[in-house]
Image (cartoon, helix red, strand yellow):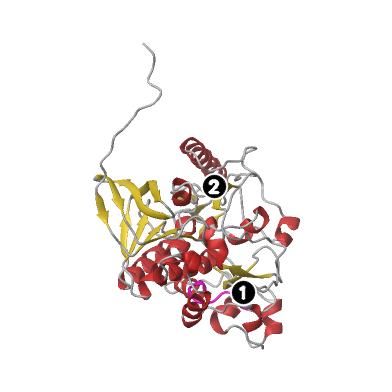
């Protein structure tokens, strides 16, 4: 008997929610999008497949809030990018990074330029529970344990996103959608143009441990390093393979290899420190770049210090001191769709810029912009830029490098 190769299903999926704004993905981009839309009075549903907000920054244990400054003494990312950084250390701060910035921003620019950048390590569990409370207080409805599996594009609008979770399959019929999934899943499901990261992802095996020297985050494998750090002490690869991060098989293999690396390291460390124990493992694969939108505009890393008339905020480059980028609104939507914005590492950028844009501050900047746009627009393509930029400015975002205050 010939094995069954394809199953044909006929589904009737109930529409369970009709929010003003559906945000898919509860990482930093999704948090910023949901919070900004809710603060503008919209009914927001935030759908997250795990049971912890923060994405790679919490469940993935990559709990380092990279710089919101340019490395020469100028803060460039404001609004929620700064608010979420300060929230991340509101309940616990050990001064690992950037104490001069976080306490008083130092007395002058020259001192800041020589010191630590405006960044910090934070406790992922405290951040996740703290930001959950902030979102609930803002009126955001959080739906945990649901995975987006399909989207319906009718004409130029996403009219439904289908999820599966405990209780079965259901649909959400939103007015506007923010794809903060990290993998650009909703745009992909809707058939919008997307691109994948050809180099793939290297294996990481970060974990929290406790031993004679106390409690700390142990970084193994793929590590986010500045250009200077990479020259001094490049990280050691844990595997000769790279992974797209877009299939269940690859993600499962990555997870097993990561777990095996942790176990080997713990056994090795216990030879000299019998008290060494793993405390927390990552509960999601530590992938950085997978799939992104091909948007109305694609930002390249060569466009440093380039004024953008449609800027929705600024970001720095965590890898090196000096660069500042104005983020065009055109990187957040597709010309083929009226009501879907993307945020975080889903934004429309070249491969070189992707590595700069995927980190927490940039996710917060693009999340705030996407959530604000979704709150006030019916069609992203015709949204008056002056209206969007006014709302962002009112929320504390500085849009242009020329607007930065002089010391």
Which of these two is toward me, 271 or 206?
206
What residue is shown at x 70% (from left), y 78% (from top)? Answer: 113
**Residue 74 in the image, given as x and y percentages of width and height:** 65, 79
Q: Is residue 76 magenta?
A: yes
Closest to the observer, 29 or 271: 29
Q: What element carries label 1?
A: loop
Q: In x, y percent, where is residue 49?
A: 37, 51
Foreground mark, 1 or 2, reads: 1
Would residue 302 be counted in the magenta stretch? no
Q: Name the residue under label 2.
A: 205
Residue marked by disc 1:
309
Q: In this view, does 376 lie to the left or right of 227?
A: left
Q: Is 236 in front, or is 215?
A: 236
Quarter residue 131 falls in? bottom left
User: Residue 232, percent across and down?
Assistant: 75, 57
Q: In which quarter of the image is the N terminus?
A: top left
Instruction: Please tell me whether mark 2 sits on a helix, a strand or a loop.
Output: loop
Q: Earlier in the sequence, mark 1 or mark 2?
A: 2
Q: Magenta region's main secondary structure?
A: loop
Quarter of the image holding residue 176? bottom left
Residue at far right of view? 231
Name which residue lies at 38% across and 68% down.
130
The span picked out in magenta is 75-81
Which residue is drawn at the image coordinates 73% and 62% (left, top)? 228
**How far apart are the alpha carbons under marks 1 and 2?**
41 Å
- Above or below for 138 versus 238: below
Neighbour tally class for label 1: few under 14, some 14-19, many 20 plus, Cα within 10 Å = some
């Amino acid at each position: 008997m010939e094995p069954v190769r394809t199953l044909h299903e006929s589904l009737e999926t109930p529409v369970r929610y009709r929010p003003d704004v559906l945000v898919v993905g509860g990482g930093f981009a999704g948090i910023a999008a949901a919070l900004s839309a809710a603060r503008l009075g919209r009914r927001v549903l935030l759908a997250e497949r795990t049971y912890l907000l923060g994405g790679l920054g919490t469940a993935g244990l990559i709990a380092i809030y990279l710089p919101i400054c340019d490395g020469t003494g100028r803060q460039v990312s404001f609004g929620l990018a700064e608010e979420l950084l300060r929230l991340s250390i509101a309940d616990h701060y050990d001064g690992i990074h950037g104490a001069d910035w976080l306490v008083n921003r130092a007395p002058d620019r020259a001192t800041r330029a020589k010191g630590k950048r405006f960044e910090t390590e934070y406790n992922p569990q405290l951040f996740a529970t703290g930001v959950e409370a902030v979102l609930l207080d803002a009126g955001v409805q959080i739906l945990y344990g649901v995975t987006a599996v399909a989207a319906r594009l009718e004409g130029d609008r996403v009219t439904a996103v289908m999820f599966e979770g405990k209780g079965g399959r259901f649909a959400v019929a939103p007015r506007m959608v923010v794809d903060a999934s990290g993998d650009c899943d909703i745009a992909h499901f809707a058939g919008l143009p997307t691109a994948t990261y050809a180099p793939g992802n290297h294996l990481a095996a970060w974990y929290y441990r406790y031993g004679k020297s106390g409690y700390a985050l142990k970084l193994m494998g793929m590590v986010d390093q500045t250009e200077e750090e990479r020259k001094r002490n490049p990280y050691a690869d844990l595997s000769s393979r790279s992974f797209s991060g877009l299939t269940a098989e690859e993600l499962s293999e990555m997870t097993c290899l990561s777990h095996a690396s942790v176990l080997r390291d713990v056994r090795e460390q216990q030879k000299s420190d019998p008290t060494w124990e793993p405390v927390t493992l990552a509960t999601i694969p530590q992938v950085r770049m997978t799939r992104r939108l091909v948007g109305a505009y694609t930002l390249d890393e060569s466009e440093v210090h380039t004024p953008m008339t449609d800027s929705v905020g600024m970001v720095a480059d965590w890898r090196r001191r000096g660069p500042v980028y104005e983020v065009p609104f055109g990187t957040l939507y597709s010309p083929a769709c009226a009501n879907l914005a993307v945020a975080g590492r889903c934004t429309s950028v070249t491969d070189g810029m992707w590595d700069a844009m995927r980190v927490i501050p940039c996710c917060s900047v693009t999340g705030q912009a996407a959530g604000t746009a979704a709150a006030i627009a019916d069609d992203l393509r015709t949204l008056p830029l002056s209206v969007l930029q006014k709302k962002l400015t009112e929320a504390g975002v500085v849009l242009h490098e020329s607007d930065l205050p002089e010391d």
